[in-house]
Amino acid sequence: MTDLEAELRRAVRGEVGFDVMSRALTTMDASNYRRVPLGVVAPRDADDVAGALAVCRERGVPVVARGGGTSIAGQATGTGVVLDFTRHMNRLLALDPETRTAVVQPGLVLDRLQEAAAPHGLRFGPDPSTHSRCTLGGMIGNNSCGSHSVAWGTTADSVRELDVLTARGERLRLGREWAGAPEGLRALVEAELARLRTGYPQLPRRISGYALDALLPERGADVARSFCGSEGTLGVLTEAVVGLVVAPRARALAVLGYADESAAAEAAAGLLPYRPLTVEGMAADLVPPASAGLPRGGAWLFVEAGGESAGEARARAEAIVRAADVLDSLIVTEPAGQRALWRIREDASGTATRMPDGTEAWPGWEDCAVPPARLGAYLREFRGLLTGHGLRGTPYGHFGDGCIHVRIDFDLLTDAGVARFRRFSEELAELVVAHGGSLSGEHGDGQARAELLPKMYGPELVALFERAKAVWDPDDLLNPGMLVRPAPLDGNLRFSVLPREPVDVAFGYPADGGDFAAAVRRCVGVAKCRTTSAAGASVMCPSFRATGAEEHSTRGRARLLHEMLAGEVITDGWRSTEVRDALDLCLSCKGCRSDCPVEVDMATYKAEFLHHHYEGRRRPAAHYSMGWLPLWLRWVTRTRTAGLVNALASVGPLAALAKRLGGIAPERELPRIAPETFSRWWRRRTVEQARRMMAEWKQRGGPVDARHPHDTDGPEPADGVTDDADDADDADDTDDFPPVVALWPDTFTEHFAPEVGKAALRVLEAAGLVVMQTPWMKWKAEVEQTPDGETWGYSANPLTSRGVRVCCGLTYLSTGQLDRARQVLRRTLDLLDPFLDPRLGESVPAFVVLEPSCAAALRTDLPELLHDDPRAARLAASVVTFAQALERYAPEWSPPALDRPVTGQTHCHQHAVLGDAADRRLREAAGLTGELTGGCCGLAGNFGFEKGHFEVSAACAQERLLPAVREAPEGTVVLADGFSCRTQLEQLAGVRARHLAQVLAEGLDRRPSKRFLSGS
């Protein structure tokens, strides 16, 4: 333990972390920059802050105050001691509806304040897109704004009083009329009144530099307002009194379509007289292709209007539409529709980090602002500057305030690219100033822009900034290198420490050019994974919501992987215990793959890490007991000992011993193995059907149609493909042959829940589909040339093929046993080889996978792990869920009319990889009403069964799933398509949940619904 660490531990009651993990987690914010701190302190109160400052002052150690770590200019990074306010100093201390004020601590997340104010009809005006994780302290430090600034201004407009500690330990209460001003500040300002009155551009989004003009006598000499936007360089905030505004009772969103972004920008200023709540702009190249419903155009303005009633809000939106010269327009009044559109805008800070072709794009010129009336002209010149430097970017942002966000495809990995980054930055600064603008219109200067402030303010005013800094912080201890005497804008780049050569990895990382470092670079730090509550259908990040620890967020884990590759803080590479421990509580739910704006896939990164970490070493017991689960279950099946295993597992001491040896949580019950597997039942059923066919043939005195869906399990993979190559007579009527699908025998359905497979088989056949068993023998394609072309058939030798099984490899993947997973998946492809022949074209059969996690593994992990095998992509493309199979191959089928409410949870892998749109439509057609929750059940395959995971697993279930089930009215159907979800509900709540196939199968004998899956 260092002397500094020991002194800090004596001086503060909060946590002090000088360990590798604490430091690695705070090297970066959401910017391009990286600085390695000495340690992290999580103060419990203002006394702790004072104690930490005293120790650091005595030793000359810099101090950086940090909130959510979402700053985009680098100001939340530092080389000394980082003060993390999110752990303890994160409370709402008071809220007064009468005075419309709130007293907050700096680590309070904005959404928590909004939730507390909402019942009183109030809200905090500024609302950055990071509102679910940014803190009030960070907002004050950066003078944050958000989409509603045209109505409610910046954070500085909402600040009333601030409690601040200076680096020398002075406690100040900042307010108007010089309240709390440090000694010397008033004299400094009064000597420079003329310069302060003329040296600042007049525009709504001027955030750059120190707001010394707020200290002018005609502006109330407001020290608190002047402190806003100082980026932690003047003092450390410990408490704030902020003002609240009245929230409109109703809102209507007018979406206005324009030909391009310049046309939208030129129109924005003309809408301000109508007093909208927002005037946000974005172009088509930032809108996901799946975002249907937008009006015609190449760019849009999102203009929100408020009112005391829905009618008044809509009337104001209609007035705005009439005043706007648009190509097309749309008014959205439903809250759900508005939220869907706003999510596109809020995710833009992450979405924009990837160009349409997958090229990386970066911040650095994220939020320049110009007078709104000049925005159109500025954007045209900005685009020209990009083109001149061979760069691309996608502008979007606060058009009503003249503030533009953009991520640009800078090459920050090579010396030449970094040099171009500097040249472009200097020229863009000159362009912004030429239009009367501010280098920062929202996120502050930090390291990204502070070096260029002389271009905006001139050397005299910048020198005044330095003098003001010296008044507040004469020892230059607080966030040095920011705002005054700044570090170079091209220094401390976080990419410079990463390896230049590709890292040898197992997965293919196709979206990142096969480069694991590029995959890790995906995380830009916007921290959507740090939300403390899952909204709507979102999943990410359940472990963070359970623990609240940064290392258990997707961002935290990505930061640790970044530092692992850098090798400076984490020096033992793939053997790192810090990375292993952080990944240990990753549920591999894949929620980040869809919910993260840049599609970080931590489940894949975890599997990759575990593969290397345990290479050539003994693994945890759970990796053998649960990772090899398919193998153990097949041995049980072969030896017909399911009953014996179940009996032994029901004996307490034996079960406890088995769990201890297998690394299984002692709180868990061992699932019962089915006495008969699904496949064995199906083959027995097929034999019985064949006997009935023979009996019918003898009774009728002639052959029967062996292609009847109830009379075969035959390996007929598609229309026109028969299992008898000599059956040329069938060629004429193949167009009438019903669609053929193959039902995948996943491990969980096969061995634990065969009743799900039986139900699915019954429903699929009732819908008119021919359902074949996924081959359990090695088939051989037989092609015969006939006068009409090729005729396909298949044959197999049971004597040489027994015991072969298809498998998605999920349990091996989730435990990082990638060599074993590759063997299993390669064997699966070999088994299915004749059915994946490219000559089949679209006739490759659809494989219906009932377990969502297995379907997701086949859809994504298979082609990414076996990226060198073209069959992997063909199999992945042919995987469908139960609902997708019915919708795609039996669109005219009418499901039974069940007319009951449902509750439960959409499987996290289904949400992240497969999508649930077909399931929603199928439930609607069957009259199953109600929404399933988002989030994760917490069991997540092997995760919730592993020793040491039970508490987190239960906390994840308690977040949304268990309350939804407990609060459901009597008679509600509990749906859970995943075996893990059903097991979690049974073990934690004593509730029996069912797969959608089971619910539909039970209703087949009822009257059919009149609603068809096709919507006709």
Image (tube, rainbow, N blue to C red):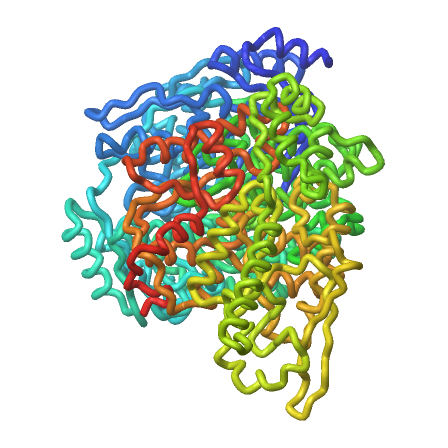
- 525 in relation to 838, above or below: above
Is residue 911 shown to the viewer in this render? yes
What residue is at 47 percent from the left and 60 percent from the top? 764
> Which image quadrant for residue 12?
top right
The image position of residue 410, as x and y in percent, is: 64, 56
Quadrant for the N terminus, please: top right
Q: Residue 843 at what x, y percent from top left? A: 59, 73
Q: Quadrant of the C terminus?
A: bottom left
Q: Position of residue 734 (x, y in %)?
A: 54, 81
* Furthest residue in direction right, as rendered: 616
Query: Where on the picture, by quarter, is residue 779?
Result: bottom right
Quarter holding residue 1012: bottom left
Residue 746 falls left or right of residue 400: right
* x 30%, y 45%: residue: 901
668 left or right, relative to 415: left
Q: Work out whether 251 lies above or below 1008.
A: above
